[in-house]
Amino acid sequence: MTSASKTSIEKEALETYERFVALRDEIDVGKKRWSDLADFFTEDAAYIDPAWGRIEGQKAIREFFEASMAGLTGHGWSTPENWTMV
């Protein structure tokens, strides 16, 4: 599908996802913090992690990202992008 044939919602979703992946890439090299990912969530969001369980609210999600990912950056951890689907 060409970008010209995508709906505005599809374009917005793909652009948002591309910003998310770009931010993750910056986190991987230590330029940004894991907590910055919380900016992609609404104030009343719920995030469910298979190990940590349910986290509710953007502030709690921000704290969760810092706590759960602490110590991984700079120690071989990365989040490469393998494929994208819209």
Image (cartoon, rainbow, N blue to C red):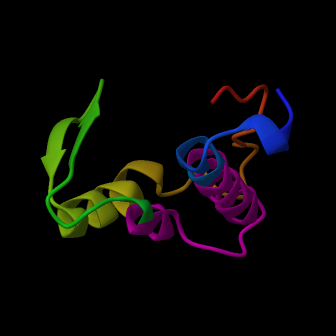
Please tell me which residue is depicted at 51% across the width and 63% down the height of the picture: 34
Residue 69, image x, y percentages: 47, 51
Q: State which quarter of the image contains the N terminus.
A: top right
In the figure, is residue 75 to the left or right of 58? right
Please tell me which residue is depicted at 59% across the width and 56% down the height of the picture: 16
- As drawn, the residue found furthest toward the bottom would be 31
Q: Which residues are magenta?
A: 13-39
Please tell me which residue is depicted at 70% across the width and 52% down the height of the picture: 18
In the figure, is residue 37 to the left or right of 24? left
- As drawn, the residue found furthest toward the right would be 2
Residue closest to the eye, 9 or 27: 9
Q: Is residue 71 magenta?
A: no
Residue 67, image x, y percentages: 35, 57
Residue 18, compared with residue 51, is above or below; it is: below
In the figure, is residue 77 to the left or right of 48? right
Q: Main secondary structure of the magenta part?
A: helix
Residue closest to the eye, 24 or 45: 45
Q: State which quarter of the image contains the C terminus.
A: top right
Residue closest to the eye, 53 or 37: 37
Q: Quadrant of residue 53 in the image?
A: top left
Q: Quadrant of residue 61 in the image?
A: bottom left
Residue 41, image x, y percentages: 34, 59
**Number of numbered discs present?**
0
Q: Is residue 30 magenta?
A: yes
Residue 48, image x, y percentages: 24, 34
Please tell me which residue is depicted at 14% across the width and 59% down the height of the picture: 44
